[in-house]
C-alpha cells in the first residue's frame, strides 16, 4: 500500500485552504475512497482518478499513478473543464466559507464530507463559533445518528461556544430527540428561554419543528409538564417560525417596521434595508386626556397607511397615570435581531412601567417582498393623498379639542364661545364634503382668536398667583 | 382500487419497498371543477399534468421493481386526473382526503413489519406553506364549501413525523424512507392574517423512539417558491427525477465481492443532479424553479442501474484551429475506437459514450505538416451527467 497525500495548487486556491472534499476512483470508475484532501489515504498500486468539485463549479482533477511507499499528488483545475466554469476569486475559500458555499449550492455530499472532517478537528482551542456551530449543524443535517450520539455521549466536554449559545441548546436538544430521549431534549429546548434565539437558520428550523411536537406532547401528557413550559414553548415556537433556507440568516431588514399612530398612519421606526441587528426608539404620547392605556400595533410594510400593511402583533401598555393628552411620554423601542425577531417595548418614562412583545417579521419570500415594494410605488400617489387627509383630520381633531378645552376651562365671553362653536360646526360640515383645508383654516382662525383671550386670562391669573392648571401647545403630537 | 401492486406474499420475510403515490390535477371544488365551487380557493386553478406525473413515477417503480434498493412490495396509487389525462384508467382511486388517509394508514401498517423495509412517497399537485418549514399537500376535495379555511389538506410534517420509528419497538418501522414533494411551496396572501392554521392530522402524533431513519425529502420547490409543469407533458420535477433515476444521477459504487462494479443512483448525487436538471428545464421553459433536499438524508442508493449509463457530452479541439489538421479518435479503456468526430459534424462535437474511462487520440493529417504532432491523452473519466473531452495535439 502506498500512503497518499494531496496538495492543492495554491496559486489557484490560496494557501489557507486546508482541504477540499475529494473522491478517488479506479480507472474502471469503481469508488475507492471519499474524504477530504488534507487526509492521508492508503492506496494499492495502480492508476486512479482523483476528483473534487468546488462550489463555483470548478473541478479539480488528477490522474494518479500510485506506486512505492509514499506519494504526493497535486490537485489542480481540470483543464478539460476550466473554460466552462465560472471561476470566482478563489481566495474566498476559507474553511468555513467553503462549507457554507457547498450548503448554499446544495452540494450535500461535499458539505457532509467537509463537516465530518471539521468535526474531527474541533478542539477546546477552537474559539470561533462561526466555525464550530455550522459544522455541528451540517452533521445534524447529514450525519449518522451514531456520530451524533457520540457528540452527546463520548465527547466529555464541549467547547465553550457549543455550551453557552442558544444554538448549542438546539443542537443538543435535536440530538437527544433523535435518540428518543425526549424529556432531556425538551429541557434543552427550554434553555432557549434564557439563551435567546439561535443565530443559525437551521437552529430555528429544528427548534420550531421539535417545539411543535413537544407542545402537542404536553397536551397529551406524554411529556412531564413543567410550570409555564407550555407558554414558553408557544412563544419560542412563534420565534422559531422565522427561518429561511440558507445557513446564515439575512442581516438586512427586508421591509420597514413601525407602528400605527393616530389617524391610521403607519409610522416607520426601522426602515427597510437597515442592517440587522438594529435598535431604534421614538417617544409617543396619549391622544386624549386621562388615557390610561395605549395599544401598540406593530406593522411591517412600505405603504403609508397602517391598514395597507401587515400587522405583526399588538400589545397594550396599561396603568398610565391620568394626565392631559400629550403629556405622558411613552418610549417605544424596537430591537430587531439578526434573525428578524423584534423585541418591541413600550415604556412609560414617568413610571418606568414597561410592556414588551417578541414578534417575528413576516414570513415573506424575496418575490413577495419585491411585490410589496412595487405595490408601494404603484400606490404612492393615492397613499400620499390618504396620508394628507389623515394628517388634516388629526389637525382638525387637535384644533377642535383645543378650542373645546379652552371654552370649558377659561372664563371666556359668550360671544367668543358662540363663535368657537360655530367654527367647529362649520368645520364638521366642511369635513363631510372633504374640504379639510378649508376646515383647518376656519378652526385656525377661531383658535387664534381664542388664544389671544386665553393668554390674556393666563396673564391675569398668573398675576393673581393662581395656576391656570392647563397648558396648550399650538401643535398636537401624533399619538398612538 | 388503491392497492395496485401487492407482492407481500412473494417477498414475505424479505425487505420490500412500499410506495404511496398521489397525483391531483382535477380539483372538484376549484373553479371549473366538477363539484360545487368553494369560496376559499386562494386563487388555485385546475392542473393538467400532476396525475400523469404521479402515474409515470408509479410506472417507473413498477418497471424497475427489482432494481430498487428493495424490490417493490406494495404500491398504493391515488390519482385525480384532469379530463384530458386520458392515459389514466378511470378506475384509479381519486386522491380525496378520506382516500388519502385510508391509504396512508395502510401504507404505514405495511411499512411497520420489517425495519429493513423501504418506503417511497410521491405527491404531485397543489401545495402551499403556512411557514417556511412547512409543506401542505392539497387533496382533490380541497375547498369543500362550508368546511373551514383549509379543509381536506395534508400537513406533510405530520406524515414525516408519523413515519418516525415508534418508541414501541414491537413495531419495526422501515428505516429507509424516500419522500418526493412535487408541489408549490408558496404562502397564500389570504393566510397572512392567521397565526398558523391547524390542519386535521393524518397520523396521531406520538413521541418517537430512536430516530435512526435515512429519510431524505426531495422538494420540487424551496420555501416560498413555485413548482412548474410543462402543460402537455409532466411536472418539471417529475421529468428531472425520472431522468436522474434512469442514469443521469448514476455513479459507480465500490467494487462488489464478485468483482462487478455496481452502478447506482445515491441520494446526494440525485439531489445535486436533480438541481442541475431542473435548472436546464428552467432555461427551456423560462421558469425559475429551485429544488431542495431536507429531512434526514444520508448518501444511500435508491436505484441500481443495469450497468454504466450512456452519457452525453462534447469534444472540442485545443487549439480550435487544429481541428482541420487532425483526425480524432476516442478510445475506450481497451484502446478500441468508439467515436471518431469528423469535420462534417457540428462543432463542438456532440457525442454519447458509455460511462467509463477514455483516451482522446489526435493524429496529424498529411499534407501539409502542421505545427503539431500526434498525441494520445491521459485517461479521462466519462461519468453522468455529461462529459467534456478535449483533443490536444502536441505542439512540435
Image (tube, rainbow, N blue to C red):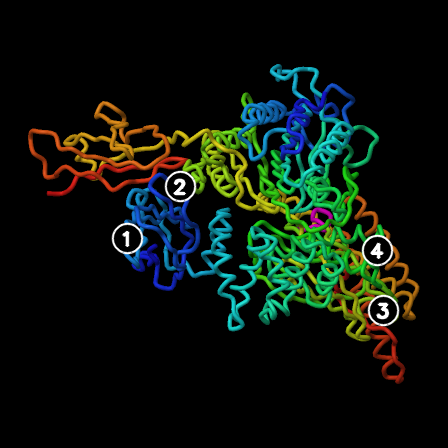
Q: Quadrant of residue A8?
A: bottom left
Circle 2 crowding by C-alpha within 10 Å: few under 14, some 14–19, many from 20: many
Q: Quadrant of residue B341?
A: top left
| Of the image marks 3 and 1, the number of the one nearer the N terminus | 1
| Of the image marks 4 and 2, the number of the one nearer the N terminus | 2
Q: Residues in magenta?
A: A304-310
Residue at the (30%, 55%) spot, across then down: A74
Instruction: Indicate the secondary structure of the residue bearing disc 2.
Output: loop
Given the image, what chain letter belongs to the residue carrying mark 4? A
Of badges 1 and 2, the one in the foreground is 1
Q: Which residue is mark 1?
A: A67
State the CA–CA distance, disc 4 to disc 2.
94 Å
What percent of the width, then of the height, locates residue A465? Answer: 88, 85
Q: Which residue is mark 2?
A: A30
Residue at the (70%, 50%) spot, across then down: A305
Checking the image for residue A423, the label placed there is 4
Checking the image for residue A320, the label placed there is 3
Query: Do marks 4 and 3 share a chain?
Result: yes
Query: Do marks 3 and 1 share a chain?
Result: yes
Query: Do marks 4 and 2 share a chain?
Result: yes
State the CA–CA distance, disc 1 to disc 2.
19 Å
Task: Note whether B91 is above or below A314 in the view shown.
Answer: above
Q: Is residue A445 visible?
A: no
Task: Note whether A235 is above or below B290 in the view shown.
Answer: below
Given the image, what chain letter belongs to the residue carrying mark 3? A
State the CA–CA distance, disc 3 to disc 1.
85 Å
Amino acid at each position: 500500500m502506498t500512503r497518499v497525500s494531496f496538495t492543492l495548487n495554491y496559486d489557484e486556491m490560496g494557501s489557507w485552504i486546508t482541504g477540499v472534499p475529494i473522491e478517488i476512483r479506479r480507472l474502471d470508475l469503481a469508488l475507492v475512497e471519499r474524504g477530504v484532501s488534507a487526509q492521508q489515504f492508503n492506496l494499492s498500486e495502480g492508476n486512479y482518478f482523483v476528483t473534487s468539485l468546488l462550489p463555483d463549479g470548478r473541478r479539480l482533477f488528477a490522474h494518479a499513478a500510485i506506486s512505492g511507499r509514499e506519494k504526493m499528488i497535486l490537485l489542480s483545475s481540470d483543464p478539460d473543464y476550466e473554460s466552462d466554469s465560472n471561476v470566482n476569486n478563489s481566495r474566498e475559500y476559507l474553511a468555513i466559507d467553503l462549507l457554507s458555499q457547498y450548503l448554499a449550492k446544495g452540494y450535500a455530499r461535499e458539505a457532509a464530507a467537509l463537516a465530518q472532517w471539521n468535526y474531527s478537528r474541533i478542539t477546546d482551542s477552537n474559539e470561533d463559533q462561526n466555525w464550530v456551530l455550522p459544522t455541528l449543524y451540517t452533521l445534524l443535517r447529514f450525519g449518522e445518528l451514531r456520530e451524533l450520539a457520540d457528540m452527546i455521549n463520548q465527547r466529555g466536554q464541549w467547547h465553550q461556544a457549543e455550551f453557552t449559545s442558544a444554538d448549542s441548546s438546539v443542537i443538543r436538544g435535536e440530538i437527544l430527540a433523535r435518540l428518543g430521549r425526549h424529556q432531556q431534549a425538551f429541557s434543552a429546548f427550554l434553555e432557549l428561554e434564557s439563551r435567546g434565539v439561535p443565530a443559525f437558520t437551521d437552529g430555528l428550523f429544528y427548534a420550531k419543528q421539535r417545539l411543535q411536537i413537544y407542545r402537542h406532547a404536553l397536551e397529551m401528557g406524554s411529556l412531564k409538564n413543567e410550570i409555564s413550559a407550555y407558554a414558553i414553548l408557544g412563544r419560542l415556537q412563534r420565534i422559531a417560525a422565522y427561518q429561511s433556507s440558507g445557513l446564515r440568516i439575512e442581516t438586512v431588514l427586508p421591509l420597514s417596521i413601525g407602528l400605527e399612530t393616530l389617524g391610521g398612519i403607519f409610522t416607520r421606526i426601522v426602515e427597510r434595508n437597515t442592517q440587522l441587528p438594529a435598535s431604534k426608539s421614538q417617544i409617543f404620547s396619549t391622544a386624549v386626556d386621562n388615557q390610561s392605556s395605549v395599544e401598540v400595533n406593530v406593522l411591517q410594510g412600505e405603504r403609508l397607511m397602517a391598514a395597507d400593511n401587515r400587522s405583526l402583533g399588538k400589545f397594550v401598555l396599561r396603568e398610565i397615570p391620568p394626565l392631559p393628552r400629550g403629556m405622558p411620554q411613552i418610549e417605544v423601542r424596537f430591537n430587531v435581531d439578526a434573525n428578524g425577531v423584534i423585541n418591541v417595548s413600550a415604556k412609560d418614562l414617568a413610571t418606568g412601567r414597561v410592556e414588551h412583545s417578541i414578534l417575528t417579521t413576516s414570513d415573506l419570500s424575496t418575490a413577495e417582498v419585491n411585490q410589496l415594494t412595487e405595490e408601494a410605488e404603484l400606490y404612492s400617489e393615492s397613499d400620499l393623498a390618504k396620508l394628507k387627509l389623515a394628517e388634516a383630520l388629526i389637525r382638525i381633531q387637535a384644533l377642535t379639542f383645543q378650542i373645546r378645552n379652552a371654552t370649558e376651562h377659561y372664563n371666556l365671553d359668550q360671544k367668543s364661545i358662540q363663535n368657537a362653536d360655530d367654527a367647529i360646526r362649520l368645520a364638521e360640515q366642511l369635513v363631510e364634503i372633504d374640504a379639510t383645508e378649508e376646515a383647518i383654516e376656519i378652526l385656525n382662525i377661531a383658535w387664534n382668536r381664542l388664544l389671544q383671550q386665553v393668554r390674556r386670562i393666563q396673564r391675569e391669573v398668573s398675576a393673581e398667583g393662581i395656576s391656570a392648571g392647563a397648558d396648550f401647545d399650538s401643535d398636537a403630537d401624533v399619538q398612538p | 382500487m388503491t392497492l395496485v401492486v401487492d407482492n407481500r406474499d412473494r417477498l414475505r420475510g424479505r425487505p420490500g419497498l412500499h410506495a404511496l403515490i398521489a397525483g391531483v390535477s382535477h380539483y372538484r371544488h376549484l373553479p371549473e371543477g366538477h363539484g360545487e365551487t368553494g369560496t376559499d380557493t386562494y386563487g388555485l386553478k385546475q392542473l393538467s399534468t400532476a396525475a400523469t406525473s404521479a402515474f409515470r413515477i408509479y410506472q417507473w417503480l413498477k418497471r424497475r421493481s427489482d432494481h430498487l434498493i428493495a424490490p417493490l412490495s406494495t404500491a398504493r396509487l391515488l390519482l385525480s386526473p384532469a379530463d384530458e389525462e386520458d392515459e389514466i384508467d378511470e378506475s384509479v382511486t381519486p386522491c380525496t382526503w378520506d382516500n388519502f388517509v385510508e391509504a396512508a394508514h395502510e401504507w404505514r401498517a405495511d411499512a411497520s413489519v420489517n425495519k429493513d423495509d423501504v418506503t417511497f412517497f410521491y405527491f404531485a399537485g397543489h401545495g402551499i406553506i403556512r411557514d417556511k418549514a412547512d409543506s401542505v399537500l392539497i387533496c382533490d376535495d380541497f375547498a369543500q364549501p362550508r368546511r373551514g379555511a383549509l379543509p381536506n389538506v395534508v400537513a406533510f410534517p405530520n406524515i414525516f413525523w408519523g413515519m418516525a420509528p415508534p418508541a414501541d419497538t414491537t413495531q419495526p418501522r422501515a428505516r429507509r424512507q424516500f419522500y418526493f414533494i412535487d408541489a408549490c411551496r408558496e404562502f397564500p396572501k389570504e393566510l397572512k392574517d392567521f397565526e398558523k392554521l391547524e390542519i386535521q392530522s393524518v397520523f396521531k402524533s406520538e413521541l418517537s423512539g430512536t430516530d435512526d431513519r435515512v429519510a431524505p425529502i426531495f422538494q420540487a420547490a424551496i420555501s416560498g417558491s413555485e413548482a412548474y409543469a410543462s402543460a402537455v407533458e409532466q411536472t418539471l420535477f417529475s421529468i428531472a427525477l425520472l431522468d436522474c433515476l434512469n442514469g443521469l444521477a448514476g455513479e459507480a459504487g465500490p467494487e462488489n465481492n464478485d468483482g462487478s462494479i455496481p452502478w447506482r443512483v445515491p441520494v446526494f448525487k440525485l439531489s445535486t443532479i436533480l438541481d442541475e436538471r431542473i435548472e436546464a428545464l428552467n432555461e427551456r421553459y423560462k421558469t425559475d424553479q429551485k429544488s431542495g433536499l431536507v429531512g434526514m438524508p444520508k448518501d444511500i442508493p435508491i436505484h441500481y442501474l443495469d450497468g454504466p449509463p450512456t452519457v452525453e457530452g462534447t469534444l472540442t479541439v485545443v487549439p480550435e484551429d487544429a481541428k482541420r489538421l487532425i483526425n480524432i479518435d476516442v478510445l475506450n479503456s481497451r484502446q478500441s475506437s468508439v467515436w471518431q468526430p469528423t469535420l462534417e459534424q457540428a462543432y463542438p462535437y456532440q457525442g454519447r459514450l458509455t460511462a467509463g474511462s477514455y483516451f482522446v487520440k489526435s493524429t496529424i493529417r498529411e499534407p501539409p505538416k502542421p505545427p503539431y504532432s500526434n498525441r494520445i491523452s491521459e485517461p479521462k473519466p466519462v461519468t453522468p451527467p455529461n462529459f467534456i473531452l478535449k483533443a490536444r495535439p502536441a505542439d512540435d
